[in-house]
Image (cartoon, grey):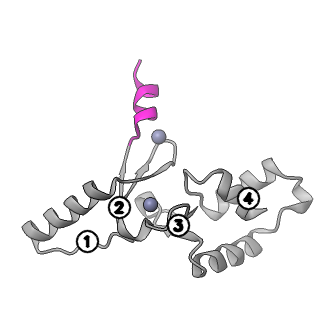
Amino acid sequence: MLLDFLLSHSDRGFSVEELYESLCITYPTDRVPGKSTLYRLIAKLVSEGLVKRFSGEHGRQFAYQIIVCDECDAHLHLKCTSCGCLYHMDHAVSQRIIHEVFNRSDFSLDEKETVLFGICKGCQKRQKP
Ligand SMILES: [Zn+2]
Ligand SMILES: [Zn+2]
């Protein structure tokens, strides 16, 4: 159930809290596992590499998102703080950014952990009057 849900929402990340609420809306509540079970299941999926864990914006809870491509360890991700969608940055662009940062600041970015926060195209459009 959890995998099905994550797969059909593979474009965004969820905190366990959000996952629980969304599962309750999508499935009959008596079939939805409790939050502590969800934490365990998610941790298992993360250790199996099926789900990726991102730090939440502003140090909030972690967000979990299913991995649909197997190259997520090699590019940066963009997270929209408005709708919560997570975008996979173009490979070439993210390599260029990593390279630039390293060249100019002698700082080696961790592409697995780095998420850039901002507002996605759809939300920018929606926010315009
Ligand atoms: Zn990715
Ligand atoms: Zn957005």
Residue 71 place in picture, x, y as percent: 43, 67
SS of the residue under disc 3: loop
> What residue is disc 4 on?
4
Which residue reaches farthest right? 30
Question: Residue type at mark 4?
Answer: Asp
Mark 4 and mark 1: span between their CA atoms? 32 Å
Question: Residue type at mark 3?
Answer: Phe
> What residue is disc 3 on?
62
Mark 1 and mark 3: span between their CA atoms? 20 Å
> What residue is disc 1 on?
109
Q: In terms of sequence position, does the residue under pointer 4 or pointer 1 come before the other?
A: 4
Q: In terms of sequence position, does the residue under pointer 4 or pointer 2 come before the other?
A: 4
* Total residue callouts: 4
Magenta region: 119-129
The residue at 79%/62% (across/down) is: 1
Q: Are marks 2 and 1 in contact (CB under 8 Å)?
A: yes
Residue 22 place in picture, x, y as percent: 72, 51
Image: 98 above or below 79: below
Q: Are marks 1 and 3 in contact (CB under 8 Å)?
A: no
Which residue reaches farthest left? 104
Q: Please say whether residue 123 is one of the residues in the magenta stretch.
A: yes
Q: Quadrant of residue 120?
A: top left
